[in-house]
Amino acid sequence: MDPGERLDHLTSVERTLLLTLCGRAEDAKSAAPLLGDTVAEEISGKICESDRATATGADLSANVAIRTAQLDQHVRKFLAEYPDAIIIELGCGLETRMFRLDLPPRSNYYCIDSPAVIELRRRLVPAHEQETGIAASLEDSQWLDAVPTHRPTIIVADGVLTFLAPAEAIELLNRLTAHFEHGELVCQANITYLTRDLGRVPELKRVGIPSPYRGFGIDDPTELERINPKLRFVEEFILARSPQYFGGFSVKFRTILRLLRLRTRWARLSTWVLRYRF
């Protein structure tokens, strides 16, 4: 009998936390880790093997490690400029970013997710003195009352916007930029072709995302500027346009990336990380 923590009580969207956690854990065990996230490896070992098995794969792990490294880099730069910053991790899952970064003493890290995920986090993730967990739906605006408004803030959305209905995602971004005086948004995004039915994505299907499942997507970074005029696009990372990372993937996946890079719209089908100021 597998003695690990079972995740049967989580919804399919909540179970997507396995993809990022196990991806970081697999990276930590690799010969040349990009993140070296031993905390994620430790947490992953506490989860039952049958659940972990739904979220494994060398190409998936490499993808997760690369997008996570991009987000880490943005947060690290923001903290270097604003050591008293607030970090908001939307849909935090079992994220361990606070352990990978050397957080300045005056910074504060807020992790927001559903009550079931925050409770799981309390059981599995080591305590961090600068972290505050907030158990709330992102559709509920009241959780923002617990977060200061006047300090520089960086909002991290690692894929979570994708699983919101378009109207919910837009409303959330509006609430965030209205609450915080200034800061940045860094997010992993998906184009609308993918978000029309997330259940057809093999990795998401394995953790239980049904088909059809429609989420929030954009096709160009400037779309968020039009949706929310307070957001100003700064830069984007597109994996298919970053050949320095291709070596960590299988021959099949490298071939796909080389084909996708031929057109920007295709290239954004690969890992896509966006940065905005507000």
Image: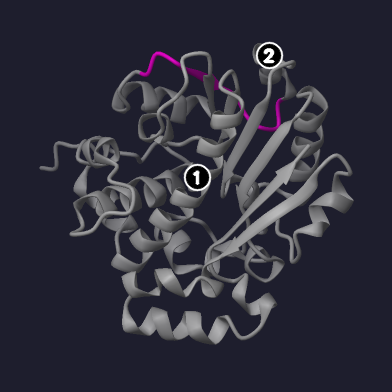
**Residue under the point 72% across and 49% down:** 165
Q: Which disc number belongs to residue 148?
A: 2
Q: Residue at x 34, y 56 (%)?
A: 55
Tell which of 203 and 208 is nearer to you: 203
Check disc 2 and report its element: helix, strand or loop. Answer: loop
Residue type at mark 2: give it: Pro
Image position, residue 236 (x, y; %): 65, 59
Residue at the location (69% across, 19% down)?
144
Disc number for residue 196: none
- Circles 2 and 1: CB atoms closer than 8 Å: no
Q: Is residue 203 left or right of residue 266?
A: left
Quickly name the residue at label 1: 73
Q: Is residue 39 above or below residue 222?
A: above
- Residue 21, image quadrant: top left
* Range of residues picked out in magenta: 128-140
The quadrant holding residue 118 is top left
